[in-house]
Image (tube, rainbow, N blue to C red):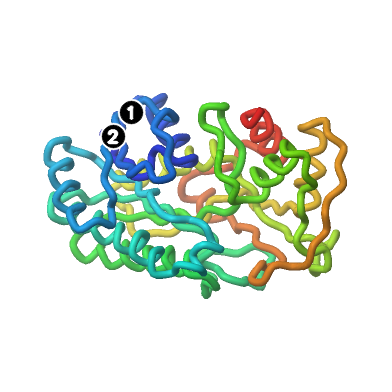
Amino acid sequence: MNLLLTGGAGYIGAHVVALAEREGHSVTVVDDLSTGVATRIVSPVVAINLASPDAVGKLSELMRATKFDAVIHLAARKQVGQSVEIPEQYFLDNIGGLANLLLAMRQENLKKLVFSSSAATYGMPTLDLVDEDYPGVPINPYGQTKLVGEWMVKNAANWGLKGVNLRYFNVAGSESKQLADTAELNLIPIAIAQLKRGEQPIVFGTDYPTPDGSCIRDYVHVKDLAKAHLMAVDYLTTPDQKYATFNVGTGQGASVLQVLEELKIASGIKFDELLADRRPGDPPRLVANTDRIEKVFGFKASFGLKEIVKSAWDAAN
């Protein structure tokens, strides 16, 4: 298939591009390269800021010149803390960018879209395994932009769009050094960077109602996530496809302290964690119910925590 992938020079996007190319798809990447790294990929990169006033015209021109079969939309700001500091910028870029993309798709009659959403849409869930029907209430602007994005995809069904939302849980790991996560935004890359600087990894909160007192999350390998995107594209081509939302995770939780134990093994470094107070807004547990994606896509994560942490360490060293 001929795919248009926004945000394809980013950490997750580059893994999706690499897998798509291996599977024989033709990929064109749209990325403003504000955080993406062009050298991660070999596909052509078209520099467009999706939230800019001229984005619809530029996207429409690109879509006319290259007849795409589907769009995978990953381009977005994704720092939770930053979204609290500059919420307006997050709404402009994440929601405005998606609005421009949908306008161009409608104009050019391009009707298949995979939308990169997030488990941040759930807020502070009370279930051990969170399913897609859980009435989540996002607790930060980033999560809010993702939930609004899902609504936009759903509403676009009115003009014929076939849309899938993929709610990512905690994405980590890497396929190679070239595709490594170079941003220090999540636990594993942050801890690796701290170790490389000779610092102690920090654990925020050890008094949660969990077995070891630290937060529990569902860590999914970025290679598994890339696979889920291409399964979603295939799903969009089926005649009985309808608008749908899917969790992408493993269904298994791991605590912060468990992750750091795996990092000690992967790195060969014995270190003591620096224990700190809780951060506001961190749910004690956030783990995916993966029944829906397993049943509909046949998706099952291939990698566990050990492989995730080791691949992340190896890619960073």
The amino acid at mark 2 is Thr
Tag 2 secondary structure: strand
Q: Is residue 215 above or below residue 18?
A: below
Quarter of the image that includes the N terminus: top left
Which percent across, then down, holds residue 249? Answer: 59, 50
Residue positioned 44% across, 30% down in the render: 40
Nearer to me, 72 or 183: 183
Residue 87 vertical position relative to residue 220 in the rendered view, above or below: below
Position of 272 with respect to 314 (left or right) is: right
Instruction: Bin the neighbour count of mark 2 within 10 Å (Cα to Cα): few under 14, some 14-19, many 20 and up.
Output: many
Residue 263, quarter of the rendered image: top right
Q: In which quarter of the image is the C terminus?
A: top right
The image quadrant of residue 231 is top left
Q: Which residue is located at x 51 percent, y 69 percent?
A: 84
**Left or right: 182, with 25 as reference point:** right
Q: Which mark is residue 72?
A: none
Q: In this view, does 288 lie above or below 29?
A: below
Q: Distance between the residues labelled 2 and 1?
A: 6 Å
Verify CB contact (< 8 Å) between mark 2 and mark 1.
yes
Q: Which amino acid does label 1 sit on?
A: Ser
Q: Name the residue under label 1.
A: 43
Residue shown at 78%/39% (left/top)? 198
Q: How crowded is mark 1: few (under 14 residues within 10 Å), some or many (20 or more)?
A: some
- The spot of residue 25 in percent (x, y) is 32, 29
Q: How many dots with numbers?
A: 2
User: Which secondary structure, mark 1?
Assistant: loop
Q: Mark 2 points at which residue?
A: 28
Residue 10 in the image: x percent, y percent? 44, 41
Q: Where is residue 75 in the image (x, y as percent from the top left)?
A: 38, 49
Which of pointers 2 and 1 lies earlier in the amino acid sequence? 2
